[in-house]
Amino acid sequence: MVSVGEKFPDLQFETYTGKTLRVSEVVTQKKHTLFWVMRFIGCRFCQYDIDALAKVYGSFEAKNAQVFAVLQSSRDSITGLKGEMNVPFQVVCDTSHAFYKALDVRAAASKEARTPTEPEDLQRFQEKQAAVAACHYQRQTGEGEAQQLPALFIVNSDGVIEYAHYAVHSIDIPSLDEMLQMLDP
């Protein structure tokens, strides 16, 4: 696992739009770069999070920040499920799981282990389940690690990790508002 104060791994990666990028190059473009490591596009929760991020992305840009959503999905699987994805941020198509391996972002042992158990977390999970269900997202299996846990990393323009969070269950990730607050000076 990586920690605050360490250099973020200098990975080369492919984006949904077909660009080949390198971490060391993209982090210099903004004061903060967030790498939000998710599961895959067939995960309805991931679709919900991507759509929610797209709606407020201007707030990240206003704080001189950029977000890369890291998915274990290919461009073809994303397009096959969602049509042409048009979001204001980059989506990393990490079918080789390079980010997951380099950052040691692990999967839970089972669906039960991925599900929150504390009352407050369980309530948030149930509320999010209802919101996701109301959006009628399509579920798709057959790609990625089904029990993958999320993670979030905030990296400064020098490539140094300012924030690192490894989830212990499926919704153990800061909210978009909390992410934005972390970017305040």
Image (cartoon, rainbow, N blue to C red):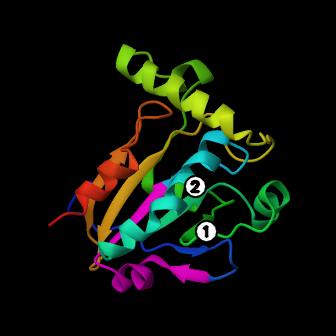
Q: Which residue is drawn at 38% across and 45% down?
A: 175
Q: Which amino acid does label 2 sit on?
A: Ile
Observer able to see residue 146: no
Foreground pick, 142 / 184: 184
Q: Name the residue under label 1.
A: 87
Label 2 sits on a secondary structure element that is helix
Q: Which mark is residue 136?
A: none
Tell me, yes or no, whether the highlighted magenta stretch contains residue 142. Answer: no
Q: Is residue 67 left or right of residue 162?
A: right
60 above or below 176? below
Residue 55 is situated, as x and y percent measured from the top left of the image, at 52, 60
Q: Do the residues labelled 2 and 1 touch (CB within 8 Å)?
A: yes
Residue bounds of the magenta highlight: 20-36
Query: Within 10 angstroms of label 2, few (less than 14), some, or many (20 or more) residues?
Result: some
Residue shown at the point (57%, 18%) measured from the top left: 112
Magenta highlight on residue 24:
yes
Decide if residue 138 is on the left or right side of residue 48: right
Amino acid type, mark 1: Val
Q: Quadrant of the C terminus?
A: bottom left
Residue 172 is situated, as x and y percent measured from the top left of the image, at 41, 35
- Cα separation between marks 2 and 1: 8 Å
Q: Mark 2 points at which residue?
A: 50
Q: Which of 26 and 139 is in front in this view?
A: 139
